[in-house]
Image (cartoon, grey):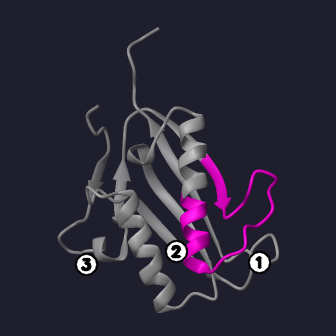
Amino acid sequence: MSDHRTLVNPSGLHDPSPFGYGHAASAPGEPVFIAGQYASDGTGEVVPGDFAAQVATAFANLRAALAGVGLGFEHVVRLGTYVVDHDPEKLAVLGKALHDGWPDGRLPAQTLSGVASLALPGMLFEVDAVAVRPPGPPN
C-alpha cells in the first residue's frame, strides 16, 4: 500500500522528529477518530506498571483500536498524548515508543499535554488519534 499521508516539517521550524512528531499532516479520505487509549486490560482496569510499561500497553491498545476499523499506525495523522507529571525522562520514553511505532520516521503531528491526573487512579499515560481511511474505489 502506498503512503497516502503528506507530512510536512517546514524549513522555518525546528526539526521535531527527534521528539517523536511532525509539524503538519494531511491525507485525502475519511477521518477516523480513536478515543483515548490507556494501559487497560480487557475489563478497563488500569494495568499496573511504570510509565514505560503503561506507554507500551496504551500504544498496543491504540493499535488494536485502529485494527478494529481496518487501519494501522501508517494511517494516523495526529496524536494527542497526555502525561501525568510530565518530565524529560518521560519525554524520552514516549519518543522511543513513537519511533518504534513509526520506524520509517514518518511521524504524525502530535500535541503532548502534561496533566495532573487522568480519568482513573493509577493512569500515567493516555493517547488518542486521528487517522484517515484512504480513498478507495467507488462502490
Front label number (3 vs 2): 2
Amino acid type of the residue that numbered disc 3 sits on in the rendered structure: His
The percent position of residue 119, horizontal first and vertical second, equals: 79, 70
Judging by the rendered image, the residue that carries numbered circle 2 is 112
The percent position of residue 35, horizontal first and vertical second, equals: 66, 52
Front label number (1 vs 2): 1
Judging by the rendered image, the residue that carries numbered circle 3 is 14
Magenta region, residue range = 34-59
Image quarter where the N terminus lies is top left
Q: Which residue lies furthest to the top in this view?
A: 139
Amino acid type of the residue that numbered disc 1 sits on in the rendered structure: Gly
Front label number (1 vs 3): 1
Q: Which residue is drawn at 46% across and 79% down?
A: 93
Give yes or no for residue 7 being in the magenta stretch. Answer: no
Residue 47 numbered mark, or none:
none
Residue 122 numbered mark, or none:
1
In three-dimensional space, the C-alpha distance between marks 1 and 2, rounded to whole angstroms, equals 19 Å
Q: Residue at x 50, y 60 (%)?
A: 79
Q: As drawn, is 96 to the left or to the right of 131?
A: left
